Image (cartoon, rainbow, N blue to C red):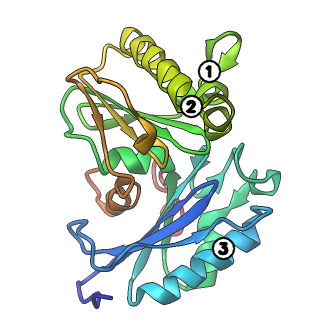
Amino acid sequence: MIEANETSPTLSVDIGGSGVKAMVLDEAGNPLTERSRVTTPQPPKPDAIIEAIAQLAAEQGQFKRVSVGFPGVVTNGITKTAVNLDPDWIGLDLATKLSEKLDKPVRVANDADVQGYGAISGKGVELVITLGTGFGSALFVEGKLVPNIELGHHKFRKKDTYEEQLGRAALKKIGKKKWNSRLKKAIASLEHLFNYDCLYLGGGEAKRINLELPPNVKIVPNVNGLLGGIALWQVDVPRRNKSNGNDQGSNE
């Protein structure tokens, strides 16, 4: 493991339905350590996942602050939805609880937003889709986040949502070929809906993509879900809510 010796090394954490990942970044967002991962505890309740993060943090070495990507709506460090985790997450002040556990300031954002910050160019209309346990989404216009679009829970086809048609459960049920066919239809639908300049496809199941993509659609590494964490500490990055003055709070 590389020693983190930057002024403000950041522990970036990505909470997923199947795994919890972590990596330390320097102030420019470059990795200072190798990524580490543990399987998401079952049932995926807050105390168990916070303990898993503490375990990863101990392995990662020195850091001064923490960024967390969470699979749901987050406001001021409080997790509002958690469809792919556990109902106990709803209304939980994750930023404060994790800050108390690690004794470091913590900021929390939606995981697709963090993935997006690690992928976008900051030009034009850019849409980010994460394909994993669920179907995450983030929309940026000239680098500015458009909050809370939560596409995964919008109707897509046959009265099903994007997540019901393209989440991991659907992939296991219908197989890769049919899943790719659905994804192709989803890409066409999203292009008409958003008229985006670029669509980024990430997440753990992006590796299953096996179709010819349009020139403005790119597959991005899953590690972007960690690399984007540095953006939560950069003052020029637009956030979903104004800071409440407490570094433990999230602006996502």
Q: Nearer the viewer, residue 185 or 50?
A: 185
- CA distance separating discs 1 and 2: 7 Å
Q: Is residue 45 above or below residue 56?
A: above
Q: At x 22% / y 24%, what residue is drawn?
A: 216
Q: Secondary structure at mark 3?
A: helix
Report whether residue 192 is seen: yes
Q: Is residue 147 above or below residue 202?
A: above
Q: At x 81% / y 57%, what residue is drawn?
A: 88
- Disc 3 packing (10 Å; few <14; some 14–19; many ≥20): many
Residue 243, labelled with which disc? none
Looking at the image, do the residues carrying marks 3 and 2 touch, with CB atoms under 8 Å apart? no
- CA distance separating discs 3 and 2: 24 Å
- Disc 1 packing (10 Å; few <14; some 14–19; many ≥20): some
Q: Amino acid at mark 2?
A: Glu
Q: Earlier in the sequence, mark 3 or mark 2?
A: 3
Looking at the image, do the residues carrying marks 1 and 2 touch, with CB atoms under 8 Å apart? yes
Q: At x 39% / y 83%, what residue is drawn?
A: 64
Q: Nearer the viewer, residue 204 or 150?
A: 204
Residue receiving disc 2 = 150
Residue 50, labelled with which disc? 3
Q: Secondary structure at mark 1?
A: loop
Q: Secondary structure at mark 2?
A: loop
Q: Position of residue 154 (x, y in %)?
A: 62, 21
Q: Position of residue 105 (x, y in %)?
A: 48, 75
Q: Earlier in the sequence, mark 3 or mark 1?
A: 3
Report whether residue 238 is seen: no
Q: Position of residue 31 (x, y in %)?
A: 27, 72
Residue receiving disc 1 = 154
Q: Amino acid at mark 1?
A: His
Residue 224 occupies quadrant: bottom left
Residue 51 occupies quadrant: bottom right
Q: Amino acid at mark 3?
A: Ile
